[in-house]
């Protein structure tokens, strides 16, 4: 009789690991967790720093801008009369500095926490499984669910660490301790919910890209549902209660501190973890619950060369970036008309926007500053698109392509062409959205579109300068390409956003290509700096191409 349980356990192990519900399925979790923390020793602090910076800007920024009770009352009146602001930021529940900080920043802090959890969980589950790392680890004394447990635990630790630092910086900014803790836990609650969403997506999809896509789509839907609920009613409607981001908002930090609402994300996270473990036991190692659709027996003529292949590999990412820029532009433009109500009458805000946007006049400075930020974010897309060359090379998919007759320069140029054209497309989408959003709000869609679309496209050469650095490193120092390119992007961001506000020397500001772009709309247009930036891009690409022709593939 005892043979039956043993046979069942042996059968379960043959399907890819220990029985799903047994303690043995978690064997090796502690060792894997230590290894995961070591792998993410740079990534985790970076995410925590971003979340802390959001809270820091909220705590100190609100006290700087809204110094008086009268200015906060004017803001509250403007928010209640403009559903667009409720759609973008959420419902304003009070007029204290803490309530305004929660209104302005909590929804986006929760959104960022969700993104952090998604990337962490997919990285340690489906991405490791796709690369074969989990199969290698599974050959040792490691339980089937150990990697899943590590991913969820790591996400929980990261969210709690971010909550701790967020609480501290909000308290240091002069806000009440209980409200600061409520803000931090509401943010962390959204993060742990989407950790389980990402874990479930990793069971459904057979690829890391698909899992991230499913989870990020769920996060976008949650944000949209929250926005629709807040814009539709004077108080949170039932739609707000259907969204994990909405749950963070209805905690009402600094205005009542509804601690009981935190039961919703905690319970959802536990239920999601249980569901994920059940789904993990119903699939094979390396496979997803949804089987991958086989491709056609023969490739189309479009895939007969490197250019078609590069487009096929990058079209999904380009479509997502384009849609994101269009929506971001619409939000930026919609706020433009009410920017005076949004930031108050502080001369310091006007001055700060003027330093970034290069103009005087609140609306023009705001639009110019946002256009510059769109250009900076577009540079992130350009870097990611160019670094696809490095990813393809590291995955050893380049040698078969070159063996089929394609030259190195054709292969490299195909991805660079997609990066150049794609950067222009996403900037055009951002300019189109900004022009339509602001134009419709002031009943001048045609005129504002004609102003703001060229303003966005003027950022094109500057964004490509950062991509040129990536191309240069891929050709000359491929091992440095990923950290070097993203470091250049980070320097441009820090100099462009914080440099003017910190009154850094002009020599430091000139390190960023975005410093040299004409400040549009409203400023004087000059083509000379754009030509110099284009010349730098061409020089970097040619130097990188020369290095690519001479060096070894994969080994560098």
Image (cartoon, rainbow, N blue to C red):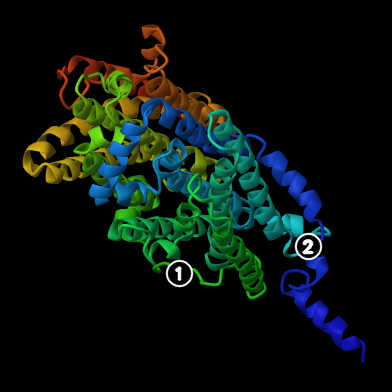
Q: In this view, does 90 lie above or below 139?
A: above
> Would you say residue 448 is visible in this rendering?
yes
Tell me the tag on residue 26: 2
Q: Is residue 478 rendered to the left or right of residue 313?
A: right
Instruction: Give x and y (percent) for residue 183.
Output: 53, 45
Q: Is residue 83 above or below residue 498?
A: below
SS under mark 2:
helix
Picture quadrant where residue 493 is located: top left
Picture quadrant where residue 509 is located: top left
Q: Is residue 504 rendered to the left or right of residue 365?
A: right
For the N terminus, which image quadrant? bottom right
Question: Which tag, 2 or 1, sits closer to the chain's start?
Answer: 2
> Would you say residue 550 is visible in this rendering?
no
Residue appearing at x 29%, y 19% in the figure? 351
Q: Is residue 391 rendered to the left or right of residue 358?
A: right
Instruction: Give x and y (percent) for residue 52.
Output: 55, 35
Q: Is residue 508 above or below residue 38?
A: above
Q: State the residue in front, 198 or 210.
A: 198
For the C terminus, which image quadrant? top right
């Amino acid at each position: 009789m005892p043979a039956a349980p043993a046979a069942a356990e042996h059968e379960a192990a043959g399907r890819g690991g220990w029985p799903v519900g047994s303690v043995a399925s978690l064997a090796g979790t502690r060792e894997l967790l230590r290894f995961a923390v070591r792998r993410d020793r740079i990534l985790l602090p970076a995410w925590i720093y971003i979340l802390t910076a959001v809270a820091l800007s909220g705590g100190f920024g609100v006290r700087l801008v809204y110094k008086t009770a009268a200015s906060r009352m004017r803001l509250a009146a403007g928010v209640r009369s403009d559903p667009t602001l409720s759609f973008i930021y959420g419902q304003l529940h009070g007029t204290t500095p803490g309530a305004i900080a929660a209104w302005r920043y909590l929804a986006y802090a929760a959104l960022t926490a969700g993104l952090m959890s998604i990337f962490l969980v997919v990285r340690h589950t489906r991405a490791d499984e796709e690369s074969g790392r989990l199969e290698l680890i599974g050959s040792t004394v490691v339980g089937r669910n150990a990697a899943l447990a590590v991913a969820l635990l790591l996400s929980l630790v990261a969210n709690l660490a971010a909550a701790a630092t967020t609480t501290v910086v909000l308290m240091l900014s002069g806000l009440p301790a209980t409200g600061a803790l409520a803000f931090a836990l509401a943010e962390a609650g959204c993060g742990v919910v989407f950790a389980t969403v990402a874990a479930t997506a990793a069971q459904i999809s057979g690829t890391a890209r698909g899992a991230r896509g499913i989870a990020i789509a769920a996060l976008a839907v949650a944000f949209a549902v929250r926005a629709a609920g807040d814009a539709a009613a004077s108080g949170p409607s039932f739609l707000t209660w259907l969204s994990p981001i909405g749950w963070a908002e209805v905690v009402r930090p600094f205005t009542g501190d509804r601690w009981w609402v935190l039961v919703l994300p905690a319970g959802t996270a536990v239920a999601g973890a249980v569901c994920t473990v059940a789904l993990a036991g119903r699939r094979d190692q390396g496979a997803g619950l949804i089987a991958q659709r086989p491709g056609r027996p023969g490739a189309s003529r479009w895939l007969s060369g490197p250019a078609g292949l590069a487009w096929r590999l990058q079209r999904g990412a380009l479509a997502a970036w384009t849609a994101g820029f269009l929506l971001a532009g619409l939000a930026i433009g919609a706020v433009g008309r009410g920017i005076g109500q949004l930031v108050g009458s502080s001369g310091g805000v006007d001055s700060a926007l003027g330093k970034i946007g290069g103009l005087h006049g609140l609306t023009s400075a705001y639009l110019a500053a946002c256009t510059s930020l769109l250009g900076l974010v577009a540079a992130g897309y350009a870097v990611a698109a160019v670094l696809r060359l490095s990813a393809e090379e590291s995955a050893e998919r380049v040698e078969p392509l070159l063996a089929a007759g394609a030259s190195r320069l054709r292969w490299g140029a195909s991805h660079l062409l997609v990066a150049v054209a794609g950067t222009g497309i996403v900037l055009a989408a951002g300019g189109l959205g900004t022009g339509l959003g602001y134009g419709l709000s002031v009943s001048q869609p045609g005129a504002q579109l004609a102003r703001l679309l060229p303003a966005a496209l003027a950022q094109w050469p500057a964004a490509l300068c950062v991509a040129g650095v990536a191309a240069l490193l891929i050709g000359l120092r491929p091992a440095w390409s990923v950290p070097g390119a993203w470091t250049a992007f980070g320097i441009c961001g820090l100099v462009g956003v914080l440099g003017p506000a910190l009154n850094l020397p002009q020599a430091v500001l000139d390190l960023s290509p975005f410093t040299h772009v004409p400040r549009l709309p409203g400023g004087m247009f000059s083509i000379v700096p754009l030509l110099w930036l284009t010349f730098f891009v061409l020089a970097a690409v040619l130097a990188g191409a020369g290095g690519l022709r001479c060096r070894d593939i994969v080994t560098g």
